[in-house]
Amino acid sequence: MKCYLVLIVGMMLVTYIPRLVPLVVLSDKPINPMVERFLKYIPYTALSALIVRGVMESKGELLVPTFIGLAASAICSWIKGSLILSVAVGIVTSLVVISLR
């Protein structure tokens, strides 16, 4: 049990410190507009990398629901522009297609 606690605290620190350091260091300094614009695209590129990997690895009976969910997510993202809503629409659409099969 003690080993798990040390492991959990260690993972917490490794996750928290990289998020805290830029906040503390850059909180007083203005950010270059070009850098700020670049940072706004990071969530979309990370999500795209995860989605493309998931689509490429899908096989068998999950292939059709994966592509339908991807299409629904892309359409929602194009219309609404919301990252969270697009992910939710893709997941729900895939689940509906799977349950209808």
Image (cartoon, helix red, strand yellow):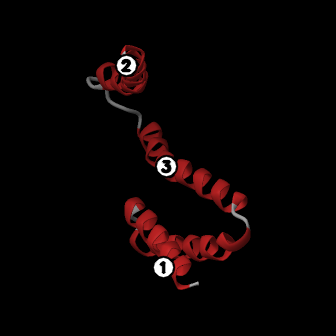
Q: Nearer the viewer, mark 1 or mark 2?
A: 2
| Residue 82 % position (x, y) | 38, 64
Q: Residue at x 57, y 70 (%)?
A: 70
Up the image or down, 16 lies above or below 74; here it is above
- Front residue of this view, candidates 6 and 70: 6
Identify residue for label 2. Answer: 1
Mark toward the start of the polypeptide (3 vs 1): 3
Q: Mark 3 to mark 1: distance in Å?
A: 30 Å
Identify residue for label 1. Answer: 96
| Residue 40 % position (x, y) | 43, 47
Picture quadrant of residue 59: bottom right
- Per the image, label 2 sits on a secondary structure element best described as loop
**Three-letter amino acid code at the position of disc 1:** Val
Q: Are marks 3 and 1 in contact (CB under 8 Å)?
A: no
Mark toward the start of the polypeptide (1 vs 2): 2
Mark toward the start of the polypeptide (3 vs 2): 2
Up the image or down, 7 lies above or below 42; here it is above
Within 10 Å of disc 2 (Cα), the crowding (few <14, some 14-19, many 20+) is few
Within 10 Å of disc 3 (Cα), the crowding (few <14, some 14-19, many 20+) is few
Q: Seen in the image, is 85 located left or right of residue 24?
A: right
Within 10 Å of disc 1 (Cα), the crowding (few <14, some 14-19, many 20+) is few
> Extreme bottom residue here?
100
| Residue 5 % position (x, y) | 36, 19
| Residue 43 % position (x, y) | 47, 48
Picture quadrant of residue 23: top left
- Front residue of this view, candidates 5 and 84: 5
